[in-house]
Amino acid sequence: MTGVQVPDGADLIVLVDVGSETERKLVQATLTDLADRPVAVAPLRGDALAEPLTDADPDTVVTAVRVAWAPRRPAGHEEEPPRRGRWSRAAPSLRRRPPGLLQKRALHRDPDRAQVVLAAPATVAELAGRWDGTGELADFVAQQAALALDRAERGVVGERVKVPRHVVEAIEASPDFGRELASLAARMECPEEELRARASAALDGLVAAVDPAAVEVFTGMFRPLHSRAWDVQADTAGLARLRELNRRHPLVFLPSHRSYVDPLVLADVLSAHDFPRNHVLGGDNLSFWPVGPLAKRAGIVFIRRSFGDDQVYKLAVREYFAFLLSKRFNLEWYMEGGRSRTGKLRPPRHGLLRYVADAVERRRVDDVLLVPVSITYDQLREVSLMAAEQGGAAKRGEGLSWLASYAREQVSTPLGTVHVAFAEPLSLAAALEAGADPADPDARRLTLQKVAFQVAVGINSVTPATATALVTLALLGVRDRALTLGQVRRVVEPLLAYLDERELPHSGASLRTFRGVRQVLGTLAGQGVVTVYDGGEEPVHAIERGQHLVAAFYRNSAIHHFVDRAIAELVMLADPADRWDEALRLRDQLKFEFFFPERDAYRERIGAELRRLDPEWETADGREVLCRVPLLVAHRVLRSFVDAQLVVAERLAARDPRTPVVDSEFLAECGGMGQQMLLQGRLHGPESLSRELFATALQLAGNLDLVDPGREELARRRQEWAAQVRDVVCRVVVIDELDAAARRESVGVEP
């Protein structure tokens, strides 16, 4: 028997949780060991416990017993390898608890599969002391016994089976919920019973189960969406420490979001390392039948994409989060609010984070650890559709036909590797304590923004520059040119050297050989991203027509590692007396595209890059410095972003300052004008014609107070901003020309 030893000599009440005759016999054999002491045996139900509990002495010990079934092991008791290939091969194995009629046969095959577990005991007096008086004591004791049995069972089957039970009932019975509901009713001047009914309905829609059988079915159905396409390489060095931390604190996993399969990939990695299943927050647009009901039983929490001013729904979310976190259930969501359309991290949204902060501030939980997670793919089939959306195409709605089409594409051919890495966790309690007064809404919002920023920085810090990203970085750096295999290598080699020198993560070691570069180019060609012409002396490679946004997606997943270097190069082309000011101006110009630290830390980082260029950078001739360094990246890293800013700046400058800017119409105008500027040679490449890049540039203009209608003074400031952007673009072009000249590859780019 597995579990906690029961004190000798104590009277006992044993609650039995069995579901079959086989389990009853196993438990009965265990109970014979307790025949020498007074024992009351009852089913694990409140109504069955009421009478024994009423007659019990306060020192009577209450415990519970159950049969725990370990997962079925294959012949030889060896771990079964991950299954790949056909959908039928991904079907779930026999559920952990076999059906009653098959349990006897299961024990005959493997007698060690079933173990009787005993819940941690407690006296009647102790249980009565924990009870808050809500409901019946017998129901409370039965609930506590079930939770204690769950903990004991996890000692046999592992942490992966940690599941929440009776969540809605527990939340509604909570005194905290009652107080919050009464307070809300008073503020809204609405009957409390009416709000309670609405809150209950909201909780019913939110609360997800984690049924092990549903988890296995869900996993078996959807694992081929990633297992057939990618090999998973996970940096799991820190997971043992995270698992230990999880014994004391709940974890909130906050991954980057590039694919619909992100939650499936992360779930497999965590399951393989014995983490309990996360409660994954997903948009209610994915709750369509029949996937939605199954997913909800497998731990997916379908949540509204916008709460609006629905205070009751906000209360339900806040209380649900507090319940899960207080019970150390882990959460997972995607702070970008949607899949990245450009390949780099989107600005994080911190709306859901405030509900976690509420739980910490209200002492519902001591601390919550935020875990930044990077999920990066060598290639993604979804990118083509997302690129089309950047060109103005409508997003296809999710549904059964969408899922069937998506599944067919995913299982067609392998796409390389998906890289999963975990950054150092952040203590939310420490961040809130170091922040400003939580009673000040603006100060609290700023604190949570800083926390979200730290999460994004953590994700970037462990995101590897993939081989695909480095090759597309090389190919997108030349305009209307094809490169030989050797020319691609000559661009990639100094990039790898820089990453190694800075000890930055990458998976591009294979690019040090011609074979490795050829393999990446071949894979990109197979996906239609790269075109190869081999009718001449040697094959040459270029981005396929219409695929520049796809290539930019892969490139952008790695450029955060090179942004400081790119800014340093632009600073070197400024007047020596103005270089620090220029570094700060560039930080402001790019702050909606990249994650920059506070000014002092930023200054230190840029200073380090400038010293790498030349120890005497403060007085050196910038052009001469750039001519002799082995690596120039500004044109490869920043050109598409400043080109998009140029389009937006010039359209605003050409606009009557009195005419209001309607975002959708203005972005469409930028798309058309950007195409004209590209044809005229004023833009480097089609990758700058991105609706998302235009939207971010417009957001920057709004931050500079250049969007809202005004008079002549606004027209003047718009012209000044356009001139500033043109100046940056011109310096990027100069760096492009210097790089081309150094490689004897003139690209003929005009300012």
Image (tube, rainbow, N blue to C red):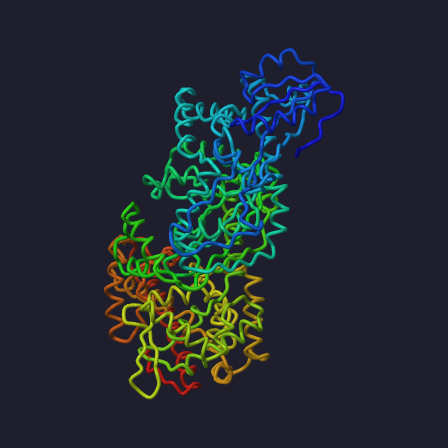
- Residue 496 in percent (x, y) is at 51, 74
Image quadrant in which the C terminus is located: bottom left
Residue at 58 percent of width and 69 percent of height: 503
- Residue 617 in percent (x, y) is at 55, 78
706 or 5: nearer the viewer: 5
Residue at 45 percent of width and 32 percent of height: 315
* Total numbered badges shown on the rendered structure: 0
Q: Is residue 193 above or below residue 80?
A: above
Image quadrant in which the N terminus is located: top right
288 or 53: nearer the viewer: 53
Q: Is residue 93 above or below residue 466?
A: above
Residue 691 seen in this snapshot: yes
633 or 484: nearer the viewer: 484
Q: Quadrant of residue 655?
A: bottom left
Question: Would residue 237 appear left or right of 206 to someone viewing this image?
Answer: right
706 or 246: nearer the viewer: 246
The extreme right residue here reads 9
Q: Is residue 560 above or below residue 541?
A: above
Residue 706 seen in this snapshot: no
- Residue 265 in percent (x, y) is at 46, 53
Question: Would residue 296 appear left or right of 542 to someone viewing this image?
Answer: right
